[in-house]
Image (spheres, rainbow, N blue to C red):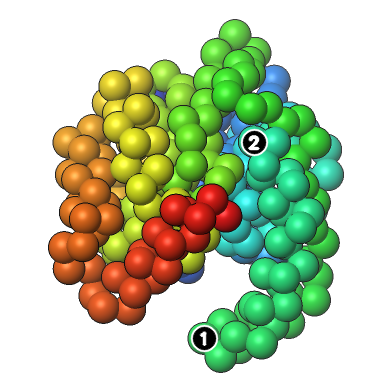
């Protein structure tokens, strides 16, 4: 059973068994900030219930780390929140959200008991966007949202608060990174730009808590794959090779 882990004062993460996904929560004196909303409205409602275990304050801010369905298809469950993301997260969700939803509805691997919840999905993109950096405040607590460049998608951002960096799917623990919409060559440089500014505790989009040496190792691993070393299983390497061709072509 998942639970909230307090990483530093008022900063929490919950690791869900579904997709081994991490969700962030920042508690202020009269408001909350939530990082990602899970994969459909039912999961979003469960998240709201779990937030109530920590605080009954209103959710003022909802941050989307990128536009992939598992991080933002629960957005509609937080109508009172200002949804924040990169400018390309907004456009990516508007353009690709319906495509993602259609693929999920046809996917053999999607859990049968969750399939009915896909009919509830309403695609709600960020309303507050930025290009490189924006500060937020949860009462007197500063939050930094930063875009370091292309990576897992074109729109990945990290959230720095206290001693914690929520890295979204720029960082993966437990499984290889996901490359389907990635920019592998640029991803390496994006991670290397992020590392010097990352906090001591880093929360990946999926998996266990990591640190900067782990992220350095992951950047080196992706660099090795870009150079042609077979560091991942063949299906992943084939995907990386295809993404490299598209990246070289500028698409």
Disc 2 marks which residue? Answer: 86
Look at 46% across and 25% down and name the residue there.
160
Look at 17% across and 68% down and name the residue there.
230
Question: From the viewer's perspective, is residue 197 above or below residue 172?
Answer: above
Do labels 1 and 2 touch, CB within 8 Å?
no
Question: How far across and how far down the image is residue 199, in percent?
Answer: 33, 24
Res. 206 in view? no
Look at 77% across and 67% down and name the residue there.
98
Q: How many labels, in total?
A: 2
Is 105 or 88 nearer to us in this picture?
Answer: 88
Question: Given this view, does label 1 or label 2 mark the residue nearer the observer?
Answer: 2
Res. 96 in view? yes
Q: Residues within 10 Å of mark 1 (few under 14, many from 20)?
A: few
Which of the 4 image quadrants contains residue 120? bottom right
Disc 1 marks which residue? Answer: 109
Determine the CA span between mark 1 and mark 2. 29 Å
For the N terminus, which image quadrant? Answer: bottom left
Look at 66% across and 44% down and name the residue there.
89
Horizontal side of 151 relative to 96 (left or right) equals left
Q: Secondary structure at mark 1?
A: loop
Is 154 or 6 nearer to us in this picture?
Answer: 154
Which of the 4 image quadrants contains residue 220? top left
Question: How far across and how far down the image is residue 109, in percent?
Answer: 52, 86
Horizontal side of 226 relative to 149 (left or right) equals left
Is 33 or 9 nearer to us in this picture?
Answer: 33
- Sequence-wise, the earlier of marks 1 and 2 is 2
For the C terminus, which image quadrant? Answer: bottom right
Residue 26 is labelled as: none
């Amino acid at each position: 059973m998942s639970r909230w882990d307090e990483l530093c004062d008022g900063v929490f993460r919950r690791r869900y068994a579904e997709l081994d996904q991490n969700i962030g929560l920042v508690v202020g004196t009269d408001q909350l900030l939530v990082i990602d909303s899970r994969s459909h409205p039912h999961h979003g409602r469960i998240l709201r219930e779990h937030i109530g275990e920590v605080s009954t304050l209103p959710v003022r801010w909802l941050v989307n780390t990128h536009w992939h369905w598992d991080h933002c298809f629960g957005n509609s469950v937080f109508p009172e929140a200002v949804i924040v993301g990169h400018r390309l997260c907004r456009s990516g969700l508007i353009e690709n959200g319906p495509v993602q939803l259609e693929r999920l509805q046809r996917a053999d691997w999607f859990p049968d008991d969750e399939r009915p919840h896909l009919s509830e999905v309403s695609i709600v993109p960020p309303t507050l966007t930025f290009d490189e950096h924006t500060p937020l405040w949860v009462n007197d607590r500063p939050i930094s949202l930063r875009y370091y460049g292309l990576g897992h998608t074109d729109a990945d951002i990290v959230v720095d608060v206290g001693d914690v960096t929520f890295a979204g799917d720029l960082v993966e623990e437990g499984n290889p990174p996901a490359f389907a919409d990635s920019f592998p060559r640029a991803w390496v440089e994006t991670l290397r730009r992020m590392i010097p500014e990352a906090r001591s505790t880093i929360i990946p989009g999926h998996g266990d808590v990591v640190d900067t040496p782990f992220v350095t190792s992951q950047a080196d691993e992706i660099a090795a794959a870009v150079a042609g070393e077979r560091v991942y299983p063949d299906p992943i390497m084939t995907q990386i090779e295809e993404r490299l061709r598209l990246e070289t072509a500028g698409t």
